[in-house]
Image (cartoon, coloured by chain):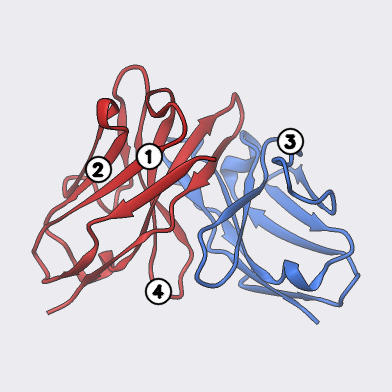
Amino acid sequence: EVQLVESGGGLVQPGGSLRLSCAASRFSFSLYEMNWVRQAPGKGLEWVSYSGVRDSTVYYADSVKGRFTTSRDNAKSSLYLQMNSLRAEDTAVYYCATGYSGDDFYYFDYWGQGTLVTVSS
Amino acid sequence: SSELTQDPAVSVALGQTVRITCQGDSLRSFYASWYQQKPGQAPVLVIYGENNRPSGIPDRFSGSRSGNTASLTITGAQAEDEADYHCNSRDSSSNHLLFGGGTKLTVL
C-alpha cells in the first residue's frame, strides 16, 4: 500500500523558515503528481502547491507564492516544501498527497498523516 | 482565483439520505472530487469524476453535478459517516486547485 510520511514540522517564529519533507514508498514516485495541502486548526483544506511529473512544473497558491518552494527528488522518492518568511496564518497541519489529473477533474488519492507547523513568537 | 462554497454543517437521521453541496463557477467546467475526513485523520477520497468511487468506498456514496453545483449524496447514512466532507476541483481560470470550506455532517 502507498505510504507517505511527512516530517520537519515544528514551532517557528514569524519571519522564520522551515523545510518539510515527504518520504514516499511502495509506489513509483517519479510517475506521480504530488501536492502539498494544509489545514489550519479547525478549518478546511487549502491546496498549497503542485509538483508535476514530466516537465517539473510547479504551481503555488497565491497565499504562499514567492515564500514557499516545492521540489522533488525522484531518486529519493521524496517531496519537499521550503517555507520562508513564515506568518501566523501559515500555522496548519501540512499534508503531502498524490494527485491525478483527469480531462475534467482532479483528485488527491493518497495522503500522508500530516506534520504540524506552528508559527508563533 | 475562483472559490468553492459549502454549507458549514448538515445533519441527517440515521438511515436517511443526505445531500452535501459544493458551489462554484469552476464546477461548470470540472467535476468535483469529494473527501471524507474524521477527527485527527487525513482525508480519504470517496468520489471523483462524474461519479466514481475508489475501491473500498461503499456504494451508498454517489456524486452528481448540475450547473455550478456539485453534490455528494449518501443514501442510507450510517453512524460511521459522521465526518467532515470536503470538495475540490480544478480552477477553470488558472492552474490552481481549489477546496471548499468543508461541511460537517452529523448523523442523528
Give, as a three-letter code, the residue at label 1: Ala
Return the residue nearer the eye: B84 or A20. A20
Residue at x 82%, y 69% (from the top left corner): B78
The answer to whether A98 appears left or right of B47 in the picture is left
Q: Quadrant of residue A24?
A: top left
Q: CA distance from mark 3 to mark 4?
A: 31 Å
Give, as a three-letter code, the residue at label 3: Glu
Q: Dot 2 falls on which chain?
A: A
Give, as a three-letter code, the residue at label 4: Pro
In the rendered image of this protein, which colour is used for chain B?
blue
The percent position of residue A116, horizontal first and vertical second, equals: 31, 66
Return the residue nearer the eye: A5 or B105. A5
Give the residue pinned by disc 3. B50
Mark 3: few, some, or many residues within 10 Å (few <14, many ≥20)?
some
Give, as a three-letter code, the residue at label 2: Tyr
The percent position of residue B104, horizontal first and vertical second, equals: 63, 72
Indicate which disc residue A80 carries.
2
